[in-house]
Amino acid sequence: GPKVLQIPSHQIIDMGQMVTLNCDPVSNHLYFYWYKQILGQQMEFLVNFYNGKVMEKSKLFKDQFSVERPDGSYFTLKIQPTALEDSAVYFCASSFPGGASNERLFFGHGTKLSVL
Amino acid sequence: QQQVRQSPQSLTVWEGETAILNCSYEDSTFNYFPWYQQFPGEGPALLISISSVSDKKEDGRFTIFFNKREKKLSLHITDSQPGDSATYFCAASASWGNEKITFGAGTKLTIKP
């Protein structure tokens, strides 16, 4: 089936540094999402993105967070500066608008971020 | 305040039995309820979903029962197999479109052979 690829699978950085998480969504999808999951627990919505704009963001999407997808390349989540509480697995997802398939969010395998 | 609640937190059943996972929600505008299956080290994958206009959705060994009045739903897995061992997330959304999906905390299901 369709694949969402996330790069890297694991990132270890020092607190205060900048990190960029990369997502290669399904090729014809137009909506993109980031979710945060701590210790295999609840998936928490961070942000969704469409047509170059943030559509909705949650309280977890702090000012230090930003997203973009320049020229149809990777959909990225940047955290600058990072904090200890940012340690989690970050999942990217994408979906296609309209039709029967719009109910499906396809998730990547996640990037495990460890902030030391 | 959790908008989607799941119980139990963990569940163990024997192979061949029926596993029942419960879910309830708060927001009356939710009208689409997907269930996701997640294996360790992987992202969640859509297993089965239901809209609020239906009270039952079946796909093979997986069935969703939905009670709109009580804002409750449940996932039944019949003839459970060891390969069904995973974490199951109940989720909800306010439309069929591209609104965000709100997840419950998950039920970790273990099937004993």
Image: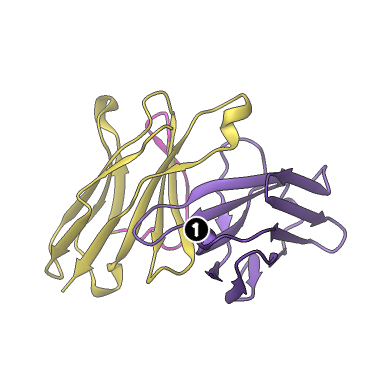
Q: What amino acid does circle 1 point to?
A: Gly
User: As drawn, is A84 to the left or to the right of A15?
Assistant: right
User: As drawn, is B62 to the left or to the right of B102?
Assistant: right
* Of residues B22 and B18, the one drawn nearer to the viewer in this rendering: B18
Asked if residue B21 can be seen in this view, the reply is no
Look at the picture and state if A113 lies above or below A57: below
Which chain is purple in the rendering?
A: B
Asked if residue B79 can be seen in this view, the reply is yes
* Of residues A37 and B57, the one drawn nearer to the viewer in this rendering: B57
Q: Secondary structure at mark 1?
A: helix
Q: Please give the name of the residue rendered at 15% of the width and 70% of the height, measured from the top-left corner.
A: A15
Q: What is the chain letter for disc 1?
A: B
Residue A61, given in percent of the width and then of the height, sits at 39, 58
Q: How is the image coloured?
A: by chain
Look at the picture and state if B7 lies above or below A80: below
Look at the picture and state if A55 lies above or below A111: above
Is A51 colored magenta in this rendering? yes
Residue B12, given in percent of the width and then of the height, sits at 58, 75
Q: Which residue is mark 1?
A: B83
The answer to which quarter of the image holds residue B97 is top right
Residue B25, given in percent of the width and then of the height, sits at 71, 63
* Of residues A20 and B82, the one drawn nearer to the viewer in this rendering: B82
**Callout 1 environment at 10 Å: few (<14), some (14 to 19), or many (20+)?**
few
Q: Please give the name of the residue rendered at 12% of the width and 62% of the height, measured from the top-left corner.
A: A17
Quarter of the N terminus of chain B within the rendering: bottom right
User: As drawn, is B6 to the left or to the right of A32?
Assistant: right
The residue most toward the right is B69
Which chain is yellow in the rendering?
A: A
Residue A40, given in percent of the width and then of the height, sits at 41, 68
Q: Please give the name of the residue rendered at 34% of the width and 59% of the height, measured from the top-left corner.
A: B41
Is B58 colored magenta in this rendering? no
- What's drawn in magenta, residue-wise? A50-63
